[in-house]
Structure formats: C-alpha cells, structure tokens
Image (tube, helix red, strand yellow):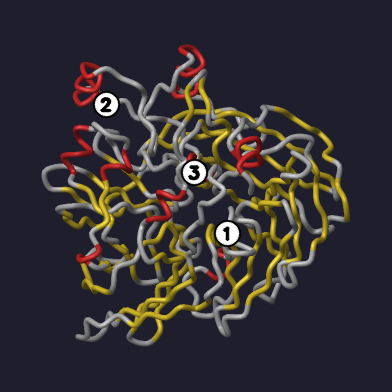
Amino acid sequence: MTVAGYATLGLGESPETVIDDVPVRGSLPDWLTGTLLRNGPGTFTVGEQRYRHWFDGLAMLHRFSIHDGRVSYGSRFLEGRARSDSQRTGRIAYSEFATDPCRSLFARTAAVFHPEVTDSAKVNITRIADRYLALAETPIQVEFDPRTLASVGVTGWDTSTFGRMTTVHPQLDRGRGEGYNLVTRYGAVSRYALRRFALDDPSLQTTTVATRAAREPAYLHSFGMSSRYLVIAEFPFTVNPLSLLLWLRPYIENFRWRPKRGTRFHVIDRSTGRPVGSWETDSFFAFHHVNAHEAGDDLVVDLVGYDDASIIDAFYVNRLEDPKSVLPTGTLRRYRLPVKGRSRSVVTETLSDTCIELPSYDDERMAMSSEHRFVYGVGLHDREGFYDQIVKIDIRDGSTRTWHEPGCYPGEAVFAGRPGRVAEDDGVLLAVVLDERAGTSFLLVLDAQSLAEIARAELPHPVLFGYHGRFYED
C-alpha cells in the first residue's frame, strides 16, 4: 500500500452508518445465513492528535448480516469513556498499546496512584452464553448488542484493572462447554493466571485453575490449548514489572527483546491445574497460536512465528507510511513438546515458508484435533508493502493457495462452514477488503476450497484495516 493510500484509507476514519441493502456482485450461497462481526480501530485521530501504532485507535464494531442472498451493514464506535472523553476534550484521553496522552510530570505521577485503563476494546470478539463481548488486552471487556452494536456494559476476566493484562484470544472447548483465558498480573512477583469459565454461564464468572510466577513477564497475545493441556509460549520479549507499574512510557515500549533467554513453553494439565513441565527452544516471537493437539507422547503446538519481535515496531504508523518499510514475515510453525517423557528437546518444523498472519481455521470442528489440515490468513504477495493477499496453507504437504487483486488489502479471512459439511474446507471465507484504487471497502466471499471469488458486497466508503472477527450463524 502506498503512503497516500494507507494514510487515506488505512489510517483515516470509518463512518458510523447503517446500510440496509449493500450492493452484491456475484451470488451468495443459499446456505450462508448469519452475521459477520468485526472489531478494530475506527479512527486514529482525536482533534489534532494522532495515535502512534496500528494497535491503537478508538474501537469500532462492524456488522455484515447475510440473509437470502442479501447483505446489510452497520458500523458504530464502541461506547465508553475512551470515546466520550476524547470527544469531549478533543484529546487522546487514555493510554493505549503504544500511545500515551500528553500529560505533565505531575499528571504522570498521579496516574501511578490512580491508573486510568482504556475501555477501547478493539481487538477481538467472542460470544459466551449469548452475550457478545468486544475484547481488549486490558482486563476491561465490553458487552454489546450484535444487532445495533450499542454497548451494553463492562465486564472482565479478572477482578482488578490495576496491574492486569489479558490475552484477546480465549480458548473455547465447545465439547466440554468451557473456556479459558490467560491473565498476566504484574507486581513484585508477577504471575500468569489461567482462568476458566462456563460457556453457558451468563454471569461470565471465572475461576483460576493455575498460576505461574514470572519475574519478568513476557508480552502474550494468545496461548494454546489441547484436549488435555494448556500451553503458554513465553517469548523473550519481557518487561520489568516496575516499569509498567510506574507507567512512564506507553505499555509496549516497556518491553525488551532478550534473545539469550530463549522461548519457554510452559504446559499445564487442564483437569488438575498442575504444571506438567517447561521446555526451552530457540528464541522466537508470535502473536497468534493456531491449534494444539496430542500425538502419542508429544504435545503439538502450531502457531505463526517470527524470528524476533521487530514486527511490533513495524506496525508504528510512521513505519506503515514509509514506502521503504518492509514487514517481517511470519510463518506457520510447529513445535513438538515431549510431555510424557524425560526429554527436554523441542522439535521445530516450518510447515510453510509462505508469509501468513491473522490465522484462522474451522475451529468449531477442528480445534484440538490431530486431523486439522487447513489454515487461512493474510500474507504478502511480493513480500513487500502491507498485507495484500489471502492465503490457504495445507498443513499436510505445505501447499498454498492464494487470492490477490492489485490495490486490494484484505483483513482476516473468517471461515464459515456449510451446514452438514464433511470436508474441512467445505465453506466460504469472509474478509473485509480495503480497495485503495476505489477508495472504498467490500466484503469478499471466497470458496474456501479453491479460493475462487464467489461474491463481494461493495460499501460506498472505506473501512479501516482491523484485526479480528467472527461469523455467527442464525
């Protein structure tokens, strides 16, 4: 994406709107009925100020409802203090991932004793007991109405907002009716806390099933789960907790890359909460776990890995606007941990050299399964610029299919499966695509098997490049 293109389309502002009938080019499958909910930044500017990083910005929800071959659309800023205070003052009001409000030394000191945590929950979406939640890395999660996108209330995975951060990818075990999330509690002795909740419990009550002490905790965006185990991949991108408690810099700028530590896998037994063991391998970094399963004596962990944490710096706005910047490429990797033996050797395998990020798959049927085969994501067509293609990787043989159109930048490809399907990839992929040439966005519908285009629903305006979403069948 060119500098002008990204500044105009990717870092501008998405409008709040409702469109009852979005023009559709092509024909949507008769069986495709439901709603795609998307989350991400709705604006990167407040008054004369601008957020500094792609992971900042004020949260906006998007709804694409599909019925009888037609599409309706709605978008709305997530309602909360971060949004209202920014509107009222014309200034950035709360600290974000890599942006702090402009504050005096006195105000910064006061913030140590009265910390203000943003409620701009812009990263992901989940549904628990028919309650829809916008998720953030802060412990504040915002419930919203999936039809109107209006905010309903605030909840959280932990009881305290101070000194807490969470992953934004809770692991859901639909077969057992339970889910987990990982909370990092910063303090004199920091801890990772794995918390469990029931998928049919509307109270969203959570209980701690395991904790692990961490002198210098790592930045964790996700974690892994198999049928028997929970796994924390602790990358050597760590922080001195005192730096976070003082909060003199934006959150992520307190972390340092320490490659000599290596990456450590900590495995916990789901049924007892007891530690199974820890295994160390060469240093790497990842945002996203994909899947995990048991294979004989091994725990197999698939994720999108990087050689270091430089991908975080690559997402600063000034870097994205630089036409000479190149994104580090993540690849689909597999790590085998010998959980039932005495060996401490981790076997590493690159499943594909194809660049991939924002991975997704048919997790309703294939989560924790050794039969899982296909992973979808965004990638780089020419290994430069911003993510401009959708990729499908076959784990079994490493083969890849792609969708690419010049000047178009797709977001996360969400899998929606055909009811009653047998083949894992019998369904469609839904992705919101930024069209730099037209200055608009469209909902792209691809055949998940071939990645051939089936249809597109064309909006009259651009939608900022977001992060994660979910398709919910009616």
Q: Element at badge 3? A: loop
Q: Which mark is residue 38?
A: none
Q: Element at badge 2? A: loop
Residue 420 in view (yes/no): no
**Horizontal and vertical percent for residue 196?**
35, 53
**Horizontal and vertical percent for residue 69?**
85, 50
Q: Which residue corresponds to the image point at 42% horizontal and 76% vertical from the top-left?
A: 334
Q: Which residue corresponds to the image point at 43% horizontal and 48% vertical from the top-left?
A: 168
Identify the residue under disc 2.
115
**Dot placed on the residue nearer the N-terminal end, 2 or 3:** 2
Identify the residue under disc 3.
123
Q: Element at badge 1? A: loop
Circle 3 crowding by C-alpha within 10 Å: few under 14, some 14–19, many from 20: many
**Horizontal and vertical percent for residue 380?**
60, 62
**Dot placed on the residue nearer the N-terminal end, 1 or 3:** 3
Q: Nearer the viewer, residue 257 or 86?
A: 257
Q: For marks 1 and 3, give the CA distance.
A: 25 Å
Inspect the image, locate mark 3, and give the three-letter code of the amino acid beneath it: Val
Q: Which mark is residue 384?
A: 1
Inspect the image, locate mark 2, and give the three-letter code of the amino acid beneath it: Pro
Inspect the image, locate mark 1, and give the three-letter code of the amino acid beneath it: Glu
Circle 2 crowding by C-alpha within 10 Å: few under 14, some 14–19, many from 20: some
Circle 1 crowding by C-alpha within 10 Å: few under 14, some 14–19, many from 20: some
Q: Which residue corresponds to the image point at 62% horizontal and 64% vertical from the top-left?
A: 382
Q: In this rendering, is residue 227 above or below 75? A: below
Q: For marks 2 and 3, give the CA distance.
A: 21 Å
Q: For marks 1 and 2, give the CA distance.
A: 40 Å
